[in-house]
Image (cartoon, coloured by chain):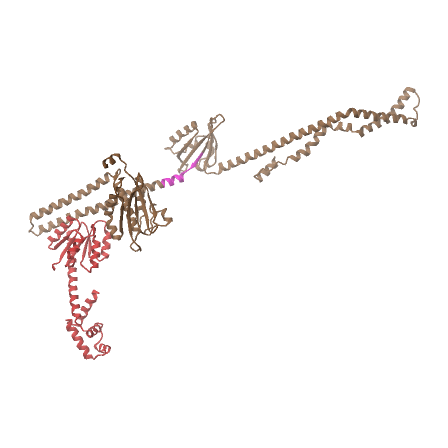
Chain colours: A brown, B red
Amino acid sequence: MSGSKNVMTQNSAPSPPAATPRLDAVDRPAVFRPGRLRYWLVYPATISLLYVLGGLLWLLVANPLLSAWLHDAPPSPLSRQWPNVLAIIASGGLLHWLLKIHDKPAYRDLEARVRERTDELLASNRTLEQQIAARIQVEYALRDSEERFRQLAEHIREVFWVYGIGEERLLYVSPAYEEVWERPIQGLYDRPLDWIEAVHPDDRPRVQVARLAMLGRGYLDEEYRIVRPDGAIRWIWDRGFPIHDEAGYVYRIAGLTEDITARRLAEDRLRRQQVELARMSRLSLAVELASNLAHELNQPLAAIVAYTQACLTLLRQDHADPRELTGTLDEIVNQGLRAGGIIRHLRELVRKHPAAQAALDLNSLIEAVIHYAQLELRQAGVTLKLELAEALPPVLADDIQTQLAVLYLIRNAIEAMPETGDGPRELTLRTAPLDADRILATVRDTGSGFGAETVERLFEPFFSTKPGGMGLGLAVSRSIIESQGGQLWATANPDRGASFHFTLPIHNNPQCSAARS
Amino acid sequence: MNDTPAVFLIDDDQAVRDAVGLLLQTSGLAVETFASAAGFLESGAAQQPGCLVLDVRMPGMSGLDLQKKLREQGCRIPIIFMTGHGDVPMAIRAMKAGAFDFIEKPFQGQTLLARVHEALALDARERRRQGRREEVAARMALLSPREREVLERVAAGQYNKVIAAELGISLSTVEIHRKRVMEKLRAESLSDLIRMLALLNDEG
């Protein structure tokens, strides 16, 4: 077997065993060995020679001695003895013939038995050979699968483990444990709960509960942190699956433990980015509101300052008419109140803001945004086309946020159509019911459009094709629309430019529809 | 046409209009207020002497639109823009388009008054120049083609002898032409003549 082992290690495919011819050569003569003496005894020439020897012995020794003893006379000369010799040989031959006749069935029987036994032995030998070959095959297969398992278990980055319920300990842990935990495996065999000591204190109670549950059900699916000896924190995903015995009881648990730190970090990054985006959208909302507020407040403030200075001028001129001054001072009071009103209105907007989803008429919302953006539109020299559906059902959305999203889409469209470009510069705003639950709004421009590779990235934060663009407008708009249960996407127009579409859910308040009917 | 220079104040906000108007009036200025750019254009006040105090952000025709329209009509009345917070890009556009200045709301009355007085002075200067230019152009129209040729060469600094040779006329004829040019243009000296020509060229 040692030779074939070498073969195996050289060739991965198991070679047929070389034992068969050797068994033939050595063992077949051994079958005949017990009958060899009898074979030579029954051989006819040997028997005949024995007869001749017997005859000669009789003639030369026994006959003279016998006749001397019987007759006390000198033996008769040899020449007269030949008839006797002939008689002896003849009787020997006869005897042999008789013997042979008598012995023939026994001989044949022997031959038959030998053949039978030989066949039996050959058959059993063949069975044995087949069994050995099969055994070798099984052994190879086993060795192969063990090898494969070993390679898998010892080279994957995941920790593979087997826990014996009866043994109350880990039966196997793959070497990756040392890489992930940065603790020696031996420690795990010495103290089976060694790994739990590395679990982050915040996660440990949860992991212990999950481990106990696993011993009962056989299943484990837990994400937790471990602290390496150097203090580094790694995220671990630990899963266990029950192995049942024939009676259906869980007797082992096979598990796979992964280091998912990289994935967790990527998820964290994504989450942070979303939070950042939400913050930016709130921030840009605040900027938008603040800019609005500043402009609104500037009017009464400018009036107050001018009125006051007019009053001062009049007073210094010494011929001030008190009635005229009173009227102006009244105006100053009015303008102060006006400024207060603006701030109060803004505060109401901000206060009710977080949960401000209400039934809104999308058409009038769009018109309000256009009113706000009309200066930008006019300065850009863009032709505005409104295709707003009549009797549009109200949408459920946040007023300010939706206005902001529409404003960003309009600005995006304006910026996509620079004055330097050729061709018509048209901005189309369209609303229409999409289905029973949603309304579709479209902002269409005749600008430069976008390439196939850009469309994927349009809504990524900080992605911009415009010089000096922050790359936030579309990302913020999408975040706003999606947070209200809608969708925002872009398509390229067949002729030129791009269209941005968004949906918003229709407000299905029964009270509301009752009020409307 | 009223020749007293006036401040034309255009703002859609009635309170601002009133307050700023009152401020300017108490400082002894003639003020005319308009609620919209269109109203100002219709009144024909753009041709009168004075200056514009204009809100940049208005519904309908904006301050920038009005500025563009006035320039197209060849009206050179100085414009002071009133801008709000965050309207700096618009203010820059306005300045590039030839605005006299811009002030940010709310503003010190003194600042506005100072700028208005400067703008009115500029307008008066411009109008005087314009008047003089028209006068010179009218006198220039009296010149004969030959006198015009002589004038061009005199202005270019050529001597009478050279002019006579170039035009193929006698030196005394050149001197006569030159004297008549001075008379027709009512120029007292050569430097006076050059200034008149410069004034005309400035317009083009």
Image check: A325 left or right of B173?
A: left
Considering every residue shown, the one lying at the far top of the view is A70
Highlighted magenta segment, given as a residue range: A256-269
Q: Is residue A263 magenta?
A: yes
Which residue does the image show at 80% across and 24% down from the upper left? Answer: A99
Query: From what the image shows, is residue B172 above or below residue A146?
Result: below
Q: Position of residue A255 (x, y in %)?
A: 45, 33
Which residue does the image show at 89% across and 25% down from the upper left? Answer: A84
Q: Is residue A60 visible?
A: no
Q: Is residue A422 magenta?
A: no
* Residue closer to the observer: A401 or A385: A385
* Residue closer to the observer: A265 or B155: B155
Q: Position of residue A346 (x, y in %)?
A: 21, 42
Q: Quadrant of residue B193?
A: bottom left
Task: Look at the image and tell me in which quarter the C terminus of chain A lies.
Answer: top left
Which residue does the image show at 17% across and 55% down from the upper left? Answer: B41
Q: Quadrant of residue A91?
A: top right
Q: How many marks?
A: 0
Q: Is residue A317 visible?
A: yes
* Residue closer to the observer: A162 or A369: A369
Task: Look at the image and tell me in which quarter the N terminus of chain A lies.
Answer: top right
Q: Quadrant of residue A349?
A: top left
Considering every residue shown, the one lying at the far front of the view is A517
Which secondary structure type mostly characterizes the magenta part of the structure?
A: helix
Q: Position of residue B4 (x, y in %)?
A: 11, 59
Image check: A473 left or right of A195?
A: left
Which residue does the image show at 59% across and 34% down from the upper left? Answer: A136
Q: Position of residue A116 (x, y in %)?
A: 69, 28
Image check: B182 left or right of A85?
A: left
